[in-house]
Amino acid sequence: MPEHRRAGPLAHLEALEQNIETDFVIADDVLPKAAEENVASADDVAEVFPKIVAAGRGRALQLRPIVEKVVELSGVEQPKVLFVGTASFDRTDKFHLCTKRFQEIGCEIRRLNVSEEETVPSPEEMREAVVEWPDVIMCSGGNTLHALIRWKEVGLDLLMKEASMKGTVLCGGSAGAGCWFSSLHTDSLRPDNTKNKEHVLSEMTDEELADWDYAKISGLGFVDAMCVPHFDATGTNDVARAEDAEKVLQEDPSTPAIGVDENAALVVVGNEAHALSGDGVATCHVIAPCEVTGEVKSTPLATEEPIPIDQLLELVETE
């Protein structure tokens, strides 16, 4: 990519690329703790942890089945929702888009803006907003790597982990889905995946805008798998998400992956998970090498049937 472009609209990519190998995992002990503690509270979903609704795209949070599942898991009719828009650079238009359905049902909603240093609240204010106040924490789509960097810098990652262990629902679409996994398949290095998107689009040619690659990066680690949001979509680089994810798994089969179609969500409740379709068609997929042939395959999950997560990650066709 031309260096003069790096100095202009693509300058933001340098900081991101320096963090491609950063380990953001801070929650890999949550599921083991859940296995020990959730037995006693299995009849009260409000106390079970973790509770995650990971949707394939941000707009899926407007689909009734997915909205209803978030509300159900919160244990109250009108949950208090904390919106964390770091991945979308705290843009107000993204806030309204993601929270629209929750506003319509009367939920109280707060915003936590930490994308820029001057908007970060004090440690005491952030703890109250993240750990003590919400029933639901909703993270926007956008640039996952930017969000993970900022959360680590301000300590928000650890606060969200603490909130999750109290039973707070974690949800989001796209970046707001992949962040909960140990790794994710991301378009964070896409040239226009930035705060000044409109400026980048006006400055670059179509060919330059299409000149980017997906990346595998670390997530927070609640679920030990690679999340592939937008699984049934093709990126602006003309490469299908599913195709590229299978290539990644072929090169490094150490961790299985879960693909989430754009209008679906993976629902995690304690140590169990299931696919939830937002439109009656979309679903989730387990992606892993076949034990017989070694070929990477994708297996769709049946919806509404909770399965222990360790078993779910082994559901790959053998033929």
Image (tube, grey):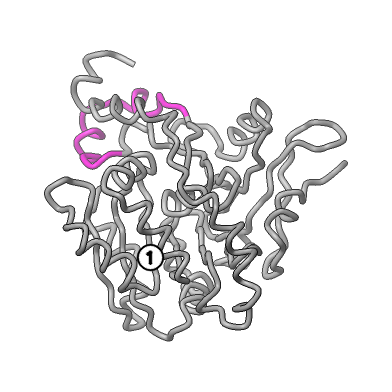
Residue for point 48% across, 38% down: 218
Q: In the figure, is residue 110 to the left or right of 49? A: left
Residue 22 in the magenta stretch? The answer is no
Residue 298 percent across, percent down from the top left: 71, 44
Q: Up-down: is 300 above or below 243? A: below
| Residue reaching furthest to the left | 118
Q: Up-down: is 279 above or below 217? A: below
Label 1 packing within 10 angstroms: few (<14), some (14-19), many (20+): many
Residue for point 65% across, 34% down: 246
Which quarter of the figure has residue 236?
Answer: top left
**Mark 1 secondary-structure assignment:** strand
Residue 241 percent across, percent down from the top left: 55, 39
| Residue reaching furthest to the bottom | 77
Name the residue that disc number 1 marks. Answer: 137
**Quadrant including the C terminus:** top right
Q: In the figure, is residue 273 to the left or right of 62? A: right
Residue for point 58% across, 47% down: 232
Q: Up-down: is 278 above or below 180? A: below
**Quadrant including the N terminus:** top left
Residue toward you, 157 or 40? 40
* Amino acid type of the residue that numbered disc 1 sits on in the rendered structure: Ile
Residue 211 in the magenta stretch? The answer is yes
Over which residues does the magenta segment extend?
Answer: 194-213
Residue 34 appearing in the image: yes
Residue toward you, 170 or 133? 133
Residue 245 percent across, percent down from the top left: 60, 36
Q: In the figure, is residue 267 to the left or right of 176? A: right
